[in-house]
Amino acid sequence: MGNLIKVLTRDIDNNGGNFFLDFENAQPSLSETALWEEVNGVLLEARVVLQQLQEYRGAGDEIRQAIQSPGVQGVQEKAWSAVVPLVGKLKTFYVFSQKLEGSLRLLLGVLTSSGSSPTQQLEQKQALARQFAHILHFTLRFDELKMTNPAIQNDFSYYRRTISRMRINNLAADEGNEVNNELANRMSLFYASATPMLKTLSDATSKFVSDNPDLPIENTTDCLSTMASVCKVMLETPEYRTRFASEETVLFCLRVMVGVIILYDHVHPAGAFIKTSNIDMKGCIRVLKDQPPSSVEGLLNALRYTTKHLNDEATSKQIKTLLQPN
């Protein structure tokens, strides 16, 4: 991202808190360092995962040839040899999703603790809020890449079909392979989702709320809505927008904004789209639609298809119309 980003947010929560949230250079306090370093290790791994996903090309040619020549052993072996290491990468991505879920829950535990308003929590724990934002940025980026790469589903489907055939023929299907049958079942559920990382984090946030009954749900939803407001103000206020040194910074904020909206919508009983929501959904959607369509279509689709309450009767027709594909 570009130069130092500081965002002044106004009237974000009931306290009308004014504060600067440094999404780029905030450093942890002494008491935050242990958690910050733990999450930072996961975020460093996230970069590698994104790089591997960007470079994922699939074994489409080998699979097609294998399907066309079912009786030619050499062609079958070539396809299998091409697919097994790719499924190994898909396993890496799946295992990483569980690490990311763990980091999200740790950060939520700190950012939603009682005693302070959401604005105060984010203001006082900026380095951890920044890490939370980076998790959401990674999540939206991962899912954008996954959605535009059909080879992932094709490779994994071929792998599972071949494993099943081996088992039927009494071959040692699980021995020496990257993914055994039990893990393949879990991975299949993961990759069946259009946005697997977002679903993982949405489920994790909902589980965080249910696992912490003594923590008011508002602590979580207010944290998420405050973060959405931070991003919206950053994007729609010219004096802050002009500080962005690159388009990457804009995309970072857009992804974080959409990510927290989706998490909020899954956790809040009535969702993000009702009139009494703490998130200005019309404003957030307009901010998205003010960007070049090519850069935000995936994010608009995430709001259309991975939120929980968009199609509820309580959602205004105006919001539904704003989110309709062109």
Image (tube, rainbow, N blue to C red):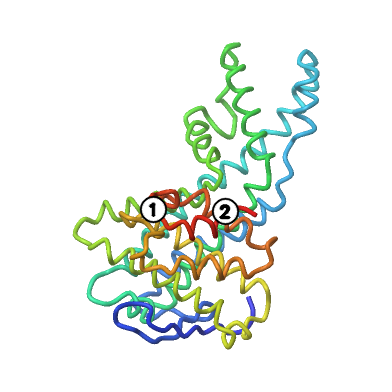
Q: Which residue is mark 1?
A: 266
In the shown orientation, is residue 233 left or right of residue 143? left
Q: Which residue is mark 2?
A: 324
Kind of residue at disc 2: Gln
1 or 2: mark nearer the eye: 2
Q: Which residue is the extreme one toward the left?
A: 214
x and y percent of residue 219 in the render?
Answer: 28, 67
Q: Residue at x 47, y 35 (%)?
A: 186
In the shown orientation, is residue 166 left or right of residue 34? right
Is residue 59 positioned above or below 99 on the image? above
Quadrant where the C terminus sits is bottom right
Q: How many marks?
A: 2
Nearest to the observer: residue 46 or residue 112:
112
Labels 1 and 2 touching (C-beta < 8 A): no
Quadrant where the N terminus sits is bottom right
Q: Residue at x 36, y 81 (%)?
A: 124
Query: What SS does tag 1 mark?
Result: helix
Nearest to the observer: residue 16 or residue 186:
16
Nearest to the observer: residue 257 or residue 246:
257
Kind of residue at disc 1: His
x and y percent of residue 266 in the render?
Answer: 38, 53
Q: Residue at x 27, y 65 (%)?
A: 218
Q: CA distance from mark 1 to mark 2?
A: 20 Å
In the shown orientation, is residue 29 left or right of residue 183? left
